[in-house]
Each structure stands twice: as structure tokens, then as C-alpha cells.
Amino acid sequence: APASAPAGRVFGPVHELFTVNLRDDVNMEVLDSALSYVARPKMETILANTASAAEAENETTGAKVWPLEYLPSKTAPPVNPVVESAPLALRASALLAPASPEYAPFLPYIFGKTVIVRTKEDAHTFRRSSKGKGVKIVALDGEVIDGDGAFGG
């Protein structure tokens, strides 16, 4: 029998593969909602380990499938979510726990340079700081400031 390529694995949709870490310094329901808002375009993306598994899943289901082998393995999210403590600014990619460590490199892809703050005032303060350049800022009270400085809700 001819040697076959190692079988690829389909892990499932992003929204089933990550959970939000509990925090006592923010309203978790609002935080969950904010993270879902930011990640919405990628929540239904299905993760697979190889391009061949992703292609097969896409052909079968028509779903958007992302092969983890395309992500640099060194893109593991930072462990410490706190960018600044006053006002509190949290890295979105460090606020979730993957169901398996192999999914972790996908978190920076989902959230990029997104930071979560408590209020729109905090968002504008962070935006003006040295760490706020080129960062998408999402305030738990509904304000969103894109990396280029444009804002909306």
C-alpha cells in the first residue's frame, strides 16, 4: 500500500475552542460581549491542524477553515494581559484560554493589537499614551477606537 500523508485534524469553530479567563476587576458579562464583538468575524472560523485538513473541511462544508500550520508557532499570546494598571488596559489576546495549547497561536490572529479598557475616557487616555499608537481599543462601555484613531461604537 502506498504511504499516505498523516491525517489532518479538524478541531472545530473558534467559539468552541477558547474560554474567557475569569477576572475580578471587570464585569465578566460585558467583557465577554466586548471580546465577542472584536472576534465576531472569526468566531465561526474552523481550526484545523494542516492545510490539507482545512481544504477537505472547506470542500465538505463550505466553511471558512484556518490551518494552524500557517501560523508562526512563535506567535503565542502574551501570558500577562495587563498592559497598564492605571487606567486598566488589558491585552485581548491574553484574556482567553485555549481548550488546547496548540490553539494558542491563533489568539493574536483573532485579536491583533486589541486592548480592552473600562470606559471611553480610559480609551482616550490610553490612545494618547505611548502604548496606544496603532492599537485597537475597546471600552467596556461601548466605545471602540481603531488603530488609526477613528472611533465609533
Image (cartoon, grey):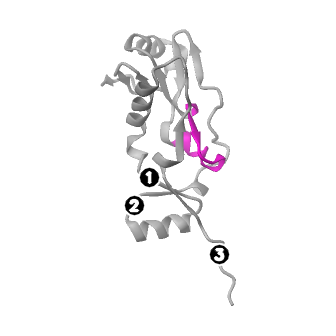
Query: Which residue is pictured at 67% across the width and 43% down the height?
Result: 74
Q: Residue furthest left?
A: 152
Q: If you read the primary sequence from the N terminus, does the residue marked by circle 3 or circle 2 appear first?
A: 3
Quickly name the residue at label 2: 63
Q: For residue 120: magenta? A: no
Q: Mark 2–mark 1 contact, CB under 8 Å?
A: yes
The magenta span reads 94-109
Q: Amino acid at mark 1?
A: Thr
Quickly name the residue at label 1: 45
Q: Secondary structure at mark 1?
A: loop
Q: Position of residue 87 (x, y in %)?
A: 51, 10
Cα–Cα gap, marks 3 and 2? 23 Å
Q: Mark 3–mark 2 contact, CB under 8 Å?
A: no
Q: Position of residue 8 (x, y in %)?
A: 59, 67
Quickly name the residue at label 3: 5
- Place residue 137 in its image quadrant: top left
Query: Which residue is pictured at 68% across the width and 87% down the height?
Result: 2
User: For mark 3, does the 10 Å Cα neighbourhood hold few (<14), some (14 to 19), or many (20 or more) residues?
Assistant: few
Residue 42 visible in the picture: yes
Q: Position of residue 5 (x, y in %)?
A: 65, 75
Q: Which image quarter is the C terminus in?
A: top left
Query: Which residue is pictured at 53% across the width and 43% down the height?
Result: 18
